[in-house]
Amino acid sequence: MSNQETIVSDTPRRSRRRSDGGPPEPPGPPTKKGGGGRGGWRRFVPSWKIVVAGFVVLAAGLFGMIMVAYANTPVPTADQAKSDALAQQSTIYYRDGKTEIAKLGTKREIIDDISKMSQSVRDAAVAIENKTFYEDSGISISGMFRSLYMTATGQQLQGASTITQQMARNYYDGLSQEVSIKRKIMEIFVAVKLDETLSKDDILKTYLNTVNFGKAYGVQAAAQAYFDKDATAAKLTPEQGAYLAARIQQPNWAPDAPELKARWKTTIQYMAEQWPDRYGKLPQTAKFPALRKDSDSNELGGLRGYMVTQVLQELEERRRLSPDAVRSGGYHIISTFDKKLMKAAETAVKSTTDSMTKEYHAGLAAVDPKNGRVLAFYGGSNYVTDPFNEPFDAKKQAASAFKPYVLAAWLQAGYSLKSYVPGNETVPKELPGQARGGFKNSHNVGPAVDVIKATADSVNTAYVSMAYALPGKIDDVKNLVEAAGFNQKRMEDDVRDHHYQFAIGSALVTPVEQAAGYSIFANAGKYTKYHVVQEVRLGKQVVYGEQLASKRVIDPGVAADATVAMQEVLRSGTARGKGLGNRPAAGKTGTNNDENGAWFVGYTPQISTAVGFYREVCKTKTGTVVKPNANRTCPVTPRNKKSTRYNIQNPYSSPYEVGLGFEGADAPTLTWQRFMLAAHEGLPIEQFPQKADVGLAENIVPSPEPKPTKTPDNPFDSGDNPFDDQGNQDCLVSPCDDNANPDDDVTIDDPGNNGNNGNGNNGDGGDQGFPQTGDVGGPGGGRAPEPRPSGWSPMSRPEDR
């Protein structure tokens, strides 16, 4: 084709003869002057008739599809009821799976006759949730638009779903709680069908039987949970009925939450507006109903509250099973707690603290080192009055009870117990994190000690130098303790803030973390995360099994040699004489700076137990010290009387930590000993593994020169002649004095002898009595460092030599 332009004439085309001489073509249709008609883009626009017809066809099709879907929607039956709607209370058991700790929630009672529900609770639910309930067809179009507007403006009081829709969603399978168009359409279909097949009374009865009120599902169980154990749905007052109805929208509100009180008032007002003949004067006379206390429900009162709370917390954090789901799920939950050992823990702590003031706090945790189960703990006397659970919640500096992890890292690096480490000053002399004057010991132990002696006598300079000498330095210790279950962020923050203070216990830890951490020594180097739930059953099915995954943190030989060193703590070190008799045991003391906290953590092959003490005084804003409450908390108001000035946000007094007056080898070790003796009753005696002698000697300092001793010319000649006439002829083996005490040379560990070793000097391992003050040089654990402000004084710990 050529590139020439083609010119098209505007005149009508004339017919042309064909080449074969045929007749001409007929003329085309006439056109209007000016080129009228539907030319250009208008040719593509359909006429209004086609548009209307299309919409009619589309609407008819959609309507037909909706009618088909509606016709195929079955009316749910009771057999399709969701398990949540018919949920029962759950039960928590001790580890035997038979002995009950507590029942959670209120046992469901399905009311079969709506007349057994008070008129006021029925009216309250309708008034606040769906005021057109008796007139609508199961759905409310106006309610949907109203809810959209009020939600956008922050005035949400009624939901978009009618009571019929809520009942369908809560009661029947297939209608999940997810927010989706598909679920909403299905819910609407089911609601309309239910409205056609069930009476309004039946719908309202089912709704109130199954709706979530927070502590319980169903109005009967809720009445007992919130008001009185003998309360019934039939006898609810208008105020009580309004209270339960107000909880429906947000069942997780606290029993007396301000938002709940506001919604309760709104419910009362709506009841008066909708039924003025019944409730016209109620807004002026109504008083917020008296609520049942948690302690009265026998669920959290006393010691059981601490166990229940830990179980619920673990299920929520590790299994995503909420407390409300537990209370209404009908679960059988088997905990790890041993009833006998829980009692032993309470007895051990109280026998020590009963003679102290309420300023003293103690926590104990015992873990099975083989599987991480928390066998027992003591966190307080009554959860309802003091919900702070000491062994799980109290984070205190570990002090010298942290040194065994440095020891483990030392041995794991290939160094041995035979190594000699600094006794007087660190190597190098200056280290990051040290106070002015460097790390110090309270006793002169000479320039060098072996690692066992450094452990038994808790030598600061030795352990800081050991941490520095590791291949990865202090990071080796940090990595090891994180592998042993300690909170990673807390460990990293402490290394950043305190540097080599970390090696002697500046990190914050809890007793349960320590008990589980020492499991690596009792269980051949393996760690299993501590836990309080064995399994969760629903009927005969195990829905949540026990998490028993373990990992190796240190080698078995390292655990064996570390145990050898810690056994010496109870034999000749800071806690000597306070072991378990002929049962092998090992452990470590610890005392914080200024005796603000004290520890003993010890173990056998069967049980690892940590005990921590601290002391808090209650001070007002002016510095006045006031007595703590009987539950060891500080008074929120003066003498705990009503006050317009003081409240929980602005308390009258607050706690401040002060010195205990004793060290780790005193009250903490005695408490540990009492518990462990009771806990091992009836258990076989198990031996620790033999010393492995891992690694090679790595002398940070030269070994000390041995001192020469005089050898007698004849070591068998005592200078006495048994045949001398002046001697006793009947005595061939001394002593021969009839009045001599054959046990004069026997040293007995007597808790009352203040550690006197018979040579006039007080030893470091005897019981100094407690509470003690001024026990400088006595037994105890290393104190953890304070943060590093300028102008620190050298650190000195009574137990650290």
Image: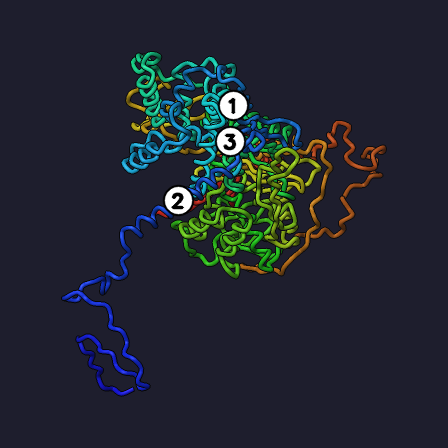
Residue at 60% across, 51% down: 551
Q: Viewer-proximal residue, 570 or 82?
A: 82
Q: Quadrant of residue 366?
A: top right
Quick one: label 3 or label 1, which is nearer the N terminus? 3
Numbered disc 3: secondary structure: helix
Image x and y of residue 359, in percent:
44, 27
Q: Please determine whether, in this image, residue 390 is positioned above or below residue 31.
A: above
Q: Viewer-proximal residue, 521 or 787?
A: 521
* Real-space Cα separation, disc 2 to disc 3, in angstroms: 33 Å
Q: Quadrant of residue 145?
A: top left
**Of labels 1 and 2, the one closer to you:** 2
Numbered disc 1: secondary structure: loop
Image x and y of residue 724, in percent:
83, 38
Q: Which residue is mark 1?
A: 301
* Real-space Cα separation, disc 1 to disc 2, in angstroms: 64 Å
Which label is found at residue 171? 3
Numbered disc 2: secondary structure: helix
